Amino acid sequence: MKKDLIRFAFVAAGVSFLYFIILSKLFYWQVVRADSLSAIGKAQSSQIIDIPAMRGEIKTSDDFPLATNSISYLAYTNPKLIEDKLSYAQKVAPIIGDDTASVAAELEQNLYWVRLAQNLDSDKKNELESLKLPGIGFEQEYTRMYPEASMAAHLVGFVGRDASGRTKGYFGIEGEYNDQLAGRSGALYAIRDALGNPILSDVREEKKTDGRNVKLTIHRTIQFITDEKLKDGMDKYGAEGGSVIVMNPETGAILAMSSYPAFSPQDYYNYEPKNYGNPALSDLYEPGSTFKVLVMGAAIDKGLVTPQTQCDICAGPVQIGEYSIKTWDNKYFANTTMEDVIVHSDNTGMTFVGRKLGVDNLVKYLKQYGIGTQTGIDLQGEATGIVREPADWYAVDLATTSFGQGISITPIQLITAVSSIANGGNLMQPYVVSQIETPDGKTIDIKPKIKNRTISEVAAKTVTSMMVDAVERGEAKWTKIPNYKIAGKTGTAQIPVAGHYDPNQTVASFVGFFPPSNPKVAMLVVLHKPKTSIYGSETAAPIFFNIARDIIKYYNLPPQ
């Protein structure tokens, strides 16, 4: 009896073990490897033909397509329905641009589906249809087109192919929103038996899902103005590169974004890959005096200075160890006010402000402004830069950072931070997509996002007034627009080369917004290594005001 129980236990254990093995194998086949085995099965039992989905359009705010599709056709036929294959080939071959023998050889295959031609235009499709041949059919195919050529190229990106040969978006909107734009391809399956012979008299179809359209915050007119004025300005001032960002400061919506050198999305492969990245997001640079408004805003918000506070170290150069802090034009104003520090872009005055703030406060406010972190803009390739922790700063770092040297930021970081001054202290998350449209006509709206508060509304209004005064009385006053108030600030930053600053190579810039009391537009112009003049007031500022004049006309803004 005991032996029988032991024998039974062994048998039960063996059966249970085998049962577990079978269950594990079934789980492995049906769950873990379900997709891959299904694909293998389809490949073994089917002739698979991809049906590409139509890629979604990229449209400006007024529904003009920056990226769309041209339609071509794939022609196919069912050889089983063709009696005289040679005659059939003789009729088809001249239209599709192939020779009769090749077409006839395709038709002789023991298949229910063969491809006749791809990329046929509508005229050739209509010509084939007019023959009323048995078994012939057509599937739409799509080729990406960019109607505005290189306009907003860095913003839009391009469509190329991945390692497996499938189309894929790269850079800009094409890259960031590839999953939304691409849709899902369909397929045609001609079913075969185990010996490879057709067993059905028809073709099974897996439906495609077309991509979604993406609607941008970009204004086509403002983008065109920005592209043209930037290119003209770069040619005039001999700059090696440049970027302009135009933003709605209330929402963070990007109205235009332009950079040069650019490329053509249609034939991107004819350009060097280094041109594909968006400098407005990915290029780190030292902002120079445009940065002063952020530091001044922090000190005013902290209650450490007012516009009338006098500088007690501004009578001459400020010595910090072995370093001597000088003004850009070697002019000094004893007891100058903070208002005049911004007007005259006084580095010694900003050193005074930096000392008032201290490293801990300065680092805190820089982080509140979003410096050293990604803005979160919905585009690929955003860089960050680094804001060091207070323990890693030296006395000279506090001074130079206060006037925008020795710290690296991106253009999108600066315009987003300055926009927080324009809108009363809210750091907005910049964005370029306002709406996503599904193939069935539904829309998904993208709402503005407030990230955090930078400075108080009172401090923001105070800095705005100082920036207006800087335009009215500063170095760029010669290019201002009569009868219109604009809050702005020039910037000229020397470029670090081999451990020192090159006095003859600069990044020239101008940042501002208008109208000051209720800003609709914030804009940043950045020029790299202008040759006619190293100063932002003589290069970047004229481009800013040239663009601003046309935007004022476009919006029909009244004089102040």
Image: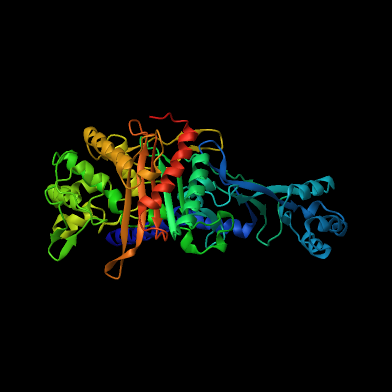
Q: Is residue 201 above or below residue 324?
A: above
Numbered marks: total: 0
> Relative to residue 125, is residue 541 drawn left or right?
left
Q: Is residue 235 above or below residue 209?
A: below
> Relative to residue 77, is residue 486 drawn left or right?
left
Q: List x then y, in percent, for residue 537.
A: 36, 50
User: Quick one: quadrant of the N terminus?
Assistant: bottom left
Colour mapping used in the image: rainbow
At a point 48% along the width and 46% down the height, the residue shown is 226
At a point 42% along the width and 52% down the height, the residue shown is 243
Residue that protrudes farthest toward the bottom in the picture:
498
The answer to whether residue 136 is seen in the rendering is no
> Relative to residue 223, is residue 145 drawn left or right?
right
Q: List x then y, in percent, for residue 111.
A: 74, 57
Q: List x then y, in percent, for residue 477.
A: 35, 43
User: Quick one: quadrant of the C terminus?
Assistant: top left
Q: List x then y, in percent, for residue 77.
A: 76, 52
Which quadrant would residue 109 be assigned to in this image?
A: bottom right
Decide which of 436, 512 is in the foreground and name it.
Answer: 512
The answer to whether residue 236 is seen in the rendering is yes
Decide which of 25, 305 is in the foreground and name it.
Answer: 305
Decide which of 42, 393 is in the foreground and name it.
Answer: 393
